[in-house]
Image: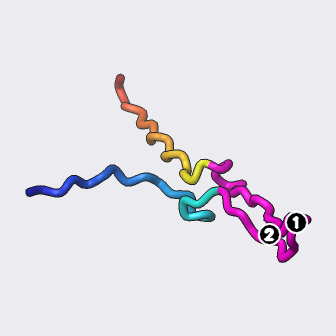
Amino acid sequence: MPQHTHARTRLCPDCDGFPAVAITTGQRTPDGHRQTITAICRTCNATGHTPAPAAARVRVLGA
């Protein structure tokens, strides 16, 4: 049975597809939970993907 191959997506080179992550500060909240901050990738604007390159514009001579 053939296996399907999925279309390749262009993952962000800076975050490798993980655009938002929670980082612990090492402190605890008053109710005992760990305090975290969310860091968002600025390169891909939290999408995890980079836009596809624009198609090359070709000028046809004599047209």
Horizontally, is 34 left or right of 5 in the view?
Answer: right
Kind of residue sitting beneath label 1: Thr
Q: Residue at x 43, y 52 (%)?
A: 9
Q: Which residue is mark 2?
A: 34
Could you say which quadrant of the image residue 24 lies in?
A: bottom right
Q: Dot 1: what SS? A: loop
Q: Looking at the picture, how far across and down is residue 13, in whole percent? A: 57, 63
Question: Is residue 23 located in the magenta-colored stretch of the structure?
Answer: yes
In the rendered view of the protein, which quadrant contains the C terminus?
top left
Residue found at the very far top of the displayed protein: 63
Identified at 42% across, 33% down, the residue is 59
Are the two marked residues, 1 and 2, in contact with CB atoms closer than 8 angstroms?
Answer: yes
Q: Residue at x 37, y 54 (%)?
A: 8
To which residue does mark 1 refer? Answer: 29
**Residue 12 on image: x %, y %:** 56, 58
The residue stretch that appears in magenta: 20-46
Q: Residues within 10 Å of mark 1 (few under 14, many from 20)?
A: few
Compared to residue 12, the image places residue 61 above or below, namely above
In the rendered image, which quarter is residue 20 located in? bottom right
